[in-house]
Every structure is written in C-alpha cells, then in structure tokens.
Amino acid sequence: MTPPHLFFYLSFTLFVSTLLFCECHVVVVETQNDQFLRRNTEDGMDLRRNTEDGMDLRRNTEDGMDLRRNTEDVNFSTDLSQVFRKVSERYLSVAIDASLVAEEKFMYLLGSPKLRTLTEALTPAFLRFGGTRQDFMVFSPHEALMQSPNYHPHNFISNADACEKLELPPLLEKRLRTEWAQQVVHLRQEDVQRKYRMMKFTEYTVDLLHSFANCTGMDLIFGLNALLRTPGNAWNSSNARSLLQYCESKQYSMDWELGNEPNSYEKKAGFRVDGNQLGQDFAHLREIIRNSTLYKDAGLYGPDVSQPREFRENLLEGFLESGAEAIDACTWHHYYVNGRDTSLEDFLDPDVLDTLASKIAEVLQTVELVSPGKKVWLGETSSAYGGGALGLSDTFVAGFMWLDKLGLGAKLGLDTVIRQVLIGSGTYHLVDDNLDPLPDYWLSVLYKRLVGPEVLKIEILNPLGKRKRVRLYLHCTNKNSTCYRSGAVTLIALNMNKSPAGVFLPAHMSVGTVEAFVLQSEQPGEEGLYSRSVRLNGDVLKMVDDRTLPELRGMRLQPGEHLQLPGFSLAFYVFTEARALACK
C-alpha cells in the first residue's frame, strides 16, 4: 500500500537557478557637482549628499576633517602584508531546526523552489539539522520498507532526478506555510513550559534533508538523539545504528553530531550527563562511524554545550578529557541576551556585543588546555536565546549583533559559525514563515560573496572614552569573486550611532577606487530598526521571483581619505586596488 507521505511526491521539472554574484555591475559616483542620485533622508542616513552640505559618502577636504558634528569618527591601522588568521571556507553556515519534524509533513517545505534559491546563495556552507528537539527525535522507519528484499536499492527520492522530484507545487507550499505558522505557536508554548514530546521521524525526513542539501550544495550535519540512555546512563546507540544503516544503504554523504546542549538535560529530561560520560558516548559513536565503509572519514562535531558558566565549563573540560580524540571540532553555543527579557537598546549596546569576546576566550582557553590545536566552532548561535526576541531578532537591528559576531569570531579564532536558524521555529530565522528573506539573510549573502576566509590585522585608533559604536573588521576579498583582482580587501563596518561616522583610511588604502555595499533599513531613524526590509545602496532588496535573487550591486567611490558611514548602517567596502600581499 502506498504510504500517505507519497502524496507529497509530485513530479515537476525543476529549473535549478544558479545565482552568480559576479555580474560586475556597479553604480559609478559622478562628479561632486552632479545631481545626487539618492534622495536625502531626514536624519542624514543617505549614502550620497549634495556637496554643498559637505556630506558626500567619501571626500577629501582641505584639512582632512569631515564637517559633520556629533559623529564618532574612527581611525585605524592595518597590516596587509600577512594573513593574521584563516577560517573555514564554510565559516558562515546555517541550521534547519529539528522542530520541523514535530509533524513530518512540514519537512516538505524543503521542496520550495524559493527556499532552495535562497539557500543556494549561501554556499559553500554546512547545513546543521538539530536543536533542542533533536534529543526527542526517534528514527521510526516503515517496517514494510525495512524488511523488503528491495530495501537496499529502493527508489524514492534518492534517484539522480531527486532535485526534480522534490519540488513542491505552489498550492501545497502555500497550505504548508499557513499550517506551519500555526504550528509555531504550539512549539513556542512547549519552549516556554520546557515540556517536549517524543517525535518519530521516518526515512522521508532523511531523504528530504539529504536531497535538499545535495540540490543546494550544502554539506549536511545530522544531529543524533543523545537522551536515549541505558540503565547505566550511557548512550543507547541502537536507534542511531538503525539510522546510519539506512543512510549508508542510500549512500547519503553527511557528517554527524550527538546531542544538543547537554548542560540543560536536567531541565529537559530530569537527569544529568557529566562531561566524562558524554566524551565516552562520542567515542562510542566514533567507533561506530569508523566501522562504516561510507562514514569512516565523516566529520563528528560536539558537544554543543551552551556558553561558559560554572557547570558548563566543567562539563566541557570533562568531555574533552575523554572525548576530544573522537571529534573533528569542538562546538559550543552562544546568544547575547534572553529573548524574553531584552530591548532595542541591548541590540545596539557595545558592552553587550563585547561579552562575546570573553566567552570566546574562555572556550578557546579550555580547549587549548585539554586538546591543543582542536578547531572550535560556534555550533549554534543567534541574537537571543529562548527562540529569539519577538520584534527584534528578525528585524534590521539584529544585523548589528550578527555582523559583529561574524567579524569578531573570525578575528579571535573561531573556525566556523552556524547561524540559528535558516528555517524553523523561533523569531531569529533568516527567512520568515512566508519563506521571504529577512534583513540578516541579505547581510549573510553579501558576507559570503565579498568576504574571504583570510583575516587581516586591523587596529582601531579611537580616543579614550569612546563607546565603540563604530566597529571595523578586515578580510581579503573572496577570491571566488572574479569581479575583483588579486590583492583586493574587504572592510566590514558597523555604525550603531544614529548620526553618520567618518572612517579615516590609512594612506596605502586611500589611493584606489572602492566599491561600497551599504545596508540600511527601509525606513529612516530609530523606527527603521524594527523594519523587516533592507536597502542596499538605497534600493530595497527583494526577490525578483521565487527562483531569482536581485543583482547586488556595489557603488563605486572615487579615491579619498575617508569613508562616510551612514547612521544605523552595516557596510562592506571592497578596496579593489589594495594590492595586499596577504591576499595574492
């Protein structure tokens, strides 16, 4: 008898839209006497101003000083001769929350052409499938299928034409989106009450996940349930063995995790698992993987502990003592604030953003002490824990936390940062319940396309007493971006002030042209910080259609001594003629 899930497998031809950034379209800034192309906003947030105001985005003045008052001007020095640090090519990665499995039908949202198009633009990247509910997931395949003599070579969506078979029809997608919005309300109640139910998933979830990752170019990391325990409190691997057996029979390439935030098991499940036992559990999983023909070289990441506090530090250290050799990277989670008790001011507070540095230092120190040289990942991260901050985590203001985390994490030594979440429950997602991209999505796409893995040393020379509301990071420009010649560098800039700020350039960076990619809210002033729309160089970003992203065009600026960074803005400046030795 045909399983009811096969109702969703409708055959349509998929036009795979390959999104290429390097169209090399730029807007060229005209002479200072030309009419400005962008209108002036009430609070001076526009990119280009009439020269009578003395407020061009980038200009030379006789005394080298900007004429605008009450700004936080910044000077910086940099070394372009050598790479300061290097991160993974998949440094910015994303997650799909395991909450989609609460009802397996919602996994079919992964067949949306729009979601695929959006996801393709974020490659190369890891795609983590996990979260709180991964520790309540049990693999329950269809018995008839598992016992079938055709079990090994059976054909559902694992064929070469899987990408075509997976595409979701528009009417069914609309229905699922509507039902998912209702489901999110129930999931939020579970999160508040911390009462989670066991969720069964079948081979269809695995098929859909792998096909989605394969068709979008993502590298899948599947999170296994670590709360399945023996009477002696060791991990019971029988369910995981069944899942691995199925995945190996289908030749599904993927990496693995075990458990999510083990420091919270007492609250979620009523018992603790100490670090030493958790390390043994990972060693057990590594042995299973090592004995697999397909997965013997697969990645294993963990323990996905929350950010450092007393018990968590002890748990992490104990885990590493018994399990460090089993893992390819040590993962931990970070959120700045409690999503149920935060404010707009927190999202713009330099002191809040600076707390990340101390947390990174603590984790790196612990890992280096027990397992020197082990890579460290932010295995799950966003702005606010508890599912995000309603009305903040999915708006323009969240970009300040996200971009600063990307910049600071790379500077301090994190190898990979996995964003919670591409799609799933909560309010910190990159796409909304209608699968439309939110401000952090566009920020992520620009980062992927303009920022390379090579981190360059940069030092901000601020006067004492400044609150560091202007923040800068420097990388080699992404070498896969063929628009730019070898030696180009990308300056990442954030201005959390309402007023514009001047960024004064070192002499060796002020002689060539620059391409500016400046993101601002669709609306001016503080009100715009709550917006779910974003402008790039003055133009509102939105998809052309479900299979096409807009051109992300830079604005070419003429040589000058400083950049004018608009208030409440996030920017990438590509110095196309920097000729950085470190980037050649």
Image (cartoon, rainbow, N blue to C red):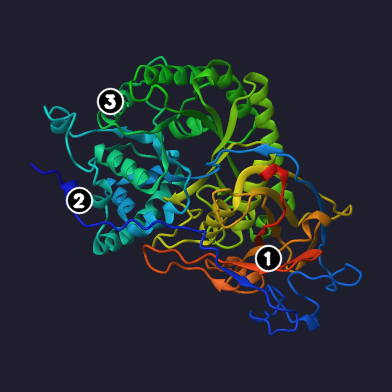
Circle 3 sits on which residue? 245
Q: Quadrant of the image for the N terminus?
A: top left
Q: Quadrant of the image for the C terminus?
A: top right
Picture residue at 26% right of the left edge, 29% below the top: 246
Q: Are marks 3 and 1 in contact (CB under 8 Å)?
A: no
Q: Give the percent coordinates (x, y) of residue 388.
A: 53, 52
Residue 421 higher or lower than 129, as above or below: below
Q: Give the percent coordinates (x, y) of residue 221.
A: 42, 36
Residue 336 at least partly seen:
no
Whole-Å distance between the Cαs marked 3 and 1? 51 Å
Residue 420 higher or lower than 445, as above or below: above
Q: Between 534 and 397, which is closer to the camera in this rendering?
A: 534
Q: Amino acid at mark 1?
A: Phe
Q: Quadrant of residue 564?
A: bottom right
Q: Amino acid at mark 3?
A: Gln
Circle 2 sits on which residue? 9
Circle 1 sits on which residue? 568
Picture residue at 69% right of the left edge, 73% below the top: 45
Q: Are marks 2 and 1 in contact (CB under 8 Å)?
A: no
Q: Give the percent coordinates (x, y) of residue 350.
A: 73, 53
Q: Between 233 and 178, which is closer to the camera in this rendering?
A: 178
Dot 1: what SS? Answer: loop
Left or right position of 59 against 571: right
Badge 3 density bin: few <14, some 14–19, many ≥20, Cα 10 Å: some
Q: Give the percent coordinates (x, y) of residue 35.
A: 69, 85
Dot 2: what SS? Answer: loop
Residue 182 higher or lower than 38, as above or below: above
Q: Between 36 and 466, which is closer to the camera in this rendering?
A: 36
Dot 3: what SS? Answer: helix
Whole-Å distance between the Cαs marked 2 and 1? 46 Å
Identify the mark at residue 99; answer none if there is no mark.
none
